[in-house]
Amino acid sequence: MRSQAGMKERRARNMEPAGIWENTDDEAAGSIAKRRNDEAKTMRAVVTGGAGFLGSHLCDYLLDHGWEVLSIDNLVTGTQANVRHLAEHPRFRMLQQDVTKFIDVPGPVDYVLHFASPASPVDYLKLPIQTLKVGSLGTLNTLGLALAKKAKYFLASTSECYGDPLVSPQPETYWGNVNPIGPRGVYDEAKRFAEAMVMAYHRAHGVDTHIVRIFNTYGPRMRLNDGRALPNFVHQALMGQPITVYGSGKQTRSFCYVSDLIEGIYRLMLSEEHEPTNIGNPQEITILEFAERVRALLGATTPIVFEPLPQDDPKQRCPDISKARRLLGWEPKVNLEDGLRLTLESFKKQFAEAQAR
Ligand code: UDP
């Protein structure tokens, strides 16, 4: 039994579902459901990974659009700092919990969005088993929650499903070129399994499911130490250290600013589309050119040095977004220059705070 005092304390820290997510018996749940039908309906979402980079931006977006949001996060790669500004928000609650274990939440739920997972290659190489578990067991548990609550379901999948692609740009119809037992396999295969599981729940149980394949995304709240190219380059430049480009730097990526990504996700959530849909920015750039752009924007003078390319590092990555354009009327609006300026400001703040500690 958890003590009342402990519960109060967790609520004070906004870690415990309360009020709108109060533990309810059936009668109370029934009356809440009835009240919801009587009033203009407020949509209730469960967002796993809500304290992560993308998850926290998604929580913000849903709250801004009038939703109630319960974030579930075990904080293994996410951080409370990403949702601190929501601490007093009347429609937001956060629960610190591991979704690879059975999950249930009190009261009705309209939408379950599964965003929990380590997502940077450095993180998932450090956490290979957790990555496999959150993509497999976490997907199973969140689908179970959606089925039990008769809620819609949304999976955050990834361009990693295409592996080191032999086709570029990558359309959703491309089946990919993944090394299942390589170091990146823990993430790629977990997400491929997750997509298969989501489609099975859709076909076998009729759950209203949606899958986004997210391409490289950047913006405020990325962790400076998450090991990805942009945070690494910025951190190195701010520290006055050489900027490390892996391989020849000729490999390409396509970087999407976070607000564009979240807008695309919201449109997909509300669409009738069940099969995976790419959301990303098709503006492709080599990693060497990207490093040079970041360096110039920061006015850094440190050299670029070349280090070995990690195993199975994709040589090219660029989304074909014709489907998103056609079905969702969506395309990215923020160009790389503007997005980088916004992101660099937030990295500088993060850096100054870390230095002051
Ligand atoms: N990369 C790099 N230097 C770094 C970190 C990453 O050259 O310090 C390269 C990496 O090898 C890859 C690209 O940048 O080719 C993007 O890597 P990231 O980890 O951001 O994400 P990925 O797209 O590989 O998932």
Image: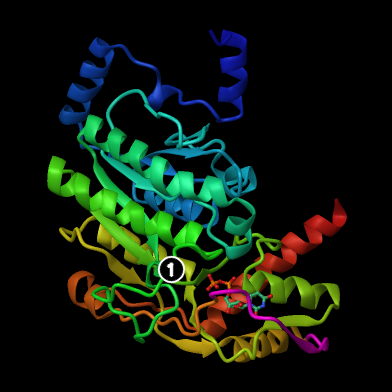
Question: Which x, y percent locates residue 284?
Answer: 46, 87
Few, some or many residues within 10 Å of mark 1 (<14, 14–19, 20+)? many
The residue segment tinted magenta is 300-312
Taken as a whole, is the magenta stretch helix, strand or loop?
loop
Q: Which residue is mark 1?
A: 160
Q: Is residue 55 placed above or below 328 in the rendered structure?
A: above
Q: Is residue 208 visible?
A: no
Observer-nearest residue: 62 or 40? 62
The amino acid marked with disc number 1 is: Glu
Q: Specify the quarter for ligand 1.
A: bottom right
Residue at disc 1, CB closer than 8 Å to ligand 1: yes
Residue located 27% across and 46% down the image: 153
Residue 208 magenta-highlighted: no
Q: Is residue 326 visible?
A: yes
Question: Which x, y percent locates residue 91?
Answer: 42, 36
| Quadrant hosting residue 305 | bottom right
